[in-house]
Amino acid sequence: MHFQFTPNEEAFRKEVRYYLEREIPKRWRELGFGLWEETDESWAITRDWNRKLGEKGWLAVAWPKEYGGQERPVMEQVVFNEEMTYQGAPTGVETMMTIGWVCPTIMIYGTEEQKQEYLRKAAKGEIVFCIGYSEPGAGSDLASLTTRAVADGDDYVINGQKIFTTMAHRADYCWLAARTDPDAPKHQGISMFIVPMNTPGVTVRPLTNILGFHSFNEVFFDDVRIPKENLVGEKNRGWYQLAIALNFERSGVAAPAGAKRMLEELVEYVKETRRNGEVLAKDPLVRHKLADLAVEIEVCRMLCYRIAGMQSKGLIPIHEASMGMLFGSELMRHLTTAGMQILGLHGLLNRGSKWAPLSGAIMRGHLASLSLGVGGGTSEIQRNIIATRGLGLPREPRV
Ligand SMILES: Cc1cc2nc3c(=O)[nH]c(=O)nc-3n(C[C@H](O)[C@H](O)[C@H](O)COP(=O)(O)OP(=O)(O)OC[C@H]3O[C@@H](n4cnc5c(N)ncnc54)[C@H](O)[C@@H]3O)c2cc1C
């Protein structure tokens, strides 16, 4: 057991860090954007940034060269993602969805034409996907989705509605789960499609999130006609592709890297801030809270490395990915809650106020953290997966 990065991985980390320290746009740093913001300006900056990384072959460093990557080992992708998050580079959720979750699934199940068409453009930062799984009547029980795709000549015709579709208003394509056999058992009649968002009949309506930003949407499909070649993988076997894509979604390493940065900023804050005549760093309650968080971050990091280690051996982490996601989302809630307690009333102030500690980042992170145990499957669903797939407990709990 070696708890160390290899010299190659360390050298790559140094190279990435050096690049990010110099290249992260000044305006982005001034704005202090976090992952939880979405404005026209943040979108423009992240889009340009992705193209810049794409030109270097860094947007998808572990992908095969023929699809625009650098064929680096999975652990170098981990190093890259850690540095990007730790340094606060302008990466948005649409990049994670496209590069981290949807395209790797297309790489497994797509035709060569699909790979050439979508992966190459995605790796250059030219296109982004949104994800159309959830519906008003299908969230945790996703397999009960009712959006229909009906074969008609050379096309499929899609009708239905998706909800909470993050970045649908920016996306070029939707990675869509639709029912293709309504008579089959519910997990067996679903197929996956790539739907261009500019197809007639696609309507996107904004939903405003808890931070007051428009990042997710309702998406309506009314007689949306797409060519049959936009089906990905086998018809009616989409559930398995969707499950693979969800495993990629649950395997991120961003949580501990972002948490580490936030903890370091809190540590600096308590060293510099006096309350009741004494520096906060001397308050035993504050010290213990920060110490507990340092432990949680280390545990989360190890969970994430284990997942990446499995992936680099070609294994598919299932309950391990759920453990990482569950722990990571709870960590962000603990961290930002502790942060709010430490900052006190000033913590309620947002960027723009000269009195806002850490430019309001803890407060925004705190609000955003409420959604972390929901998107990609709620914490309860992750616990169910750990119980059944990890511990071998029966599927249906006794009520
Ligand atoms: C920030 C954010 C971004 C999102 N982005 C997208 C996106 O891009 N695309 C997309 O398709 N969806 C997206 N979602 C939707 C997300 O996947 C769903 O909200 C989630 O799967 C839960 O579904 P639901 O909201 O319908 O809740 P429900 O399934 O109705 O659950 C309600 C409550 O019941 C609990 N519950 C349900 N079933 C069980 C069970 N079997 N055992 C124990 N407890 C259970 C849940 O844990 C939850 O607390 C996003 C959500 C958020 C918050």
Image (tube, helix red, strand yellow):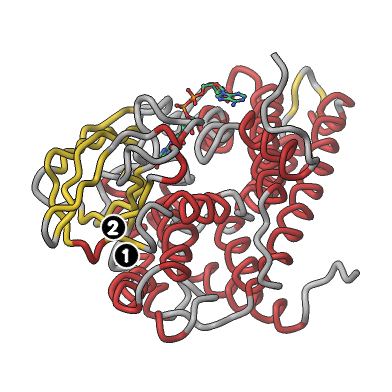
Q: Quadrant of residue 329?
A: top right
Whichever of callouts 2 and 1 sits on the residue coming sooner in the sequence is 1
* Residue 90, image x, y percentages: 44, 57
Front position in the image: 81 or 157 = 157
- Label number found at residue 253: none
Position of the N terminus, as image quadrant, is bottom right
* Residue 127, image x, y percentages: 29, 64
Instruction: State the SS at label 1.
Output: helix
What is the three-letter code of the residue carrying label 2? Ile
Instruction: State the SS at label 2.
Output: strand
Position of the C terminus, as image quadrant, is top right
Q: Is residue 106 left or right of residue 43?
A: right
* Residue 219, image x, y percentages: 24, 37
Q: Quadrant of residue 109?
A: bottom left
Front position in the image: 2 or 396 = 396
- Label number found at residue 48: 1
What is the three-letter code of the residue carrying label 1? Asp
Q: Is residue 245 left or right of residue 129?
A: right
Q: Callout 2: few (<14), some (14-19), or many (20+) C-alpha neighbours within 10 Å?
A: many
Q: Residue at x 37, y 79 (%)?
A: 55
Residue placed furthest toward the front: 183
On screen, residue 86 above or below 220: below
Q: Is residue 128 left or right of residue 395?
A: left
Q: Which residue is mark 2?
A: 194
Front position in the image: 232 or 124 = 232
